[in-house]
Image: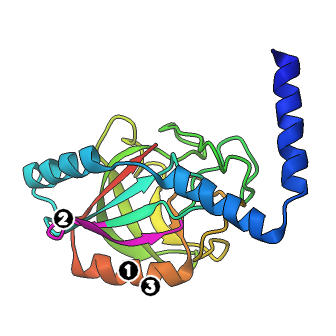
Amino acid sequence: MQYIKIVLIAVFFISCKNETPSQKLARIDSEKTELKAKDYGSYINEAKSYVNKNNLNQNKFILINLGLHSGLKRFFVYDLKKETITNSYMVSHGCGENMWSWTSSKEDAPISNEPDSHCSSIGKYVISSRGVSQWGIKVNYLLIGKDETNSNAVKRAIVLHSWEKISTDEVYPEGTPEGWGCPAVSNESMYEIDALLKANKNMLMWIIK
């Protein structure tokens, strides 16, 4: 069985090496489509119930899917009134035990709620006060973890901010540079997100994997 697996991997790499540029683009597009094929219906329904119950913003919420490859757009702004995704952005995750700013875990983001873990934390957050950041466009938003899986967010200084290393466009099959657990977006994206958050207070951000 192990021998067959090795042979299949070898055949895959040989076939990829012999691809024409157009074949490579077609393969990458096919891979991206397959990776993005996820139904978020159950998350949307739960988010609607959650914001109503907790008196949060009724218009929009943010869903980040760290289960997606980091070279894809996986930060989604969802309009609860129109029931549609209005914007999507690139976003980083934490490096964990890997090297800061590398892309070592682009296919499998490490998750932890522990201080100094340098990991991202899944769960629901309330996007709170706007502050000054040392990164990107110098703006950040405090994230208050509301679940057991992200309860240390404030203690860990987990905030939403921008970072020059983050691309605005998808880079798949390459990955996005990894930080110390904050969801970081590109500078260009942060200008749009900042305007959104200034107009929509107390929004829900839900990070899943």
Q: Between disc 3 and disc 2, whose residue precedes?
A: 2
Pick the front one: 105 or 194: 105
Q: Is residue 62 above or below residue 94?
A: below
Q: Is residue 75 left or right of residue 135?
A: left
Q: Amino acid at mark 3?
A: Tyr
Residue at (87%, 46%) from the top-left corner? Answer: 13
Q: From this viewpoint, is residue 152 visible?
A: yes
Q: Secondary structure at mark 2?
A: loop
Number of the front mark, 2 or 1: 2
Mark 3 in CB contact with mark 2 (< 8 angstroms): no
For residue 80, which numbered disc appears in the image? Answer: 2
Residue 57 image offset from top left, x and y in percent: 16, 65
Quarter occupied by the N terminus = top right
Q: Main secondary structure of the magenta part?
A: strand
Q: Amino acid at mark 1?
A: Asp
Q: Which stretch did the figure color magenta?
A: 78-90
Q: Is residue 128 above or below residue 119?
A: below
Residue 136 image offset from top left, x and y in percent: 57, 79
Other residues around mark 1 within 10 Å, as few (<14) / some (14–19) / many (≥20): some
Magenta stretch containing residue 5, yes or no?
no
Q: Between disc 2 and disc 1, whose residue precedes?
A: 2
Q: Which residue is mark 3?
A: 191
Q: Which residue is mark 1?
A: 194
Q: Is residue 126 left or right of residue 164?
A: left
Mark 1 in CB contact with mark 3 (< 8 angstroms): yes
Other residues around mark 3 within 10 Å, as few (<14) / some (14–19) / many (≥20): some
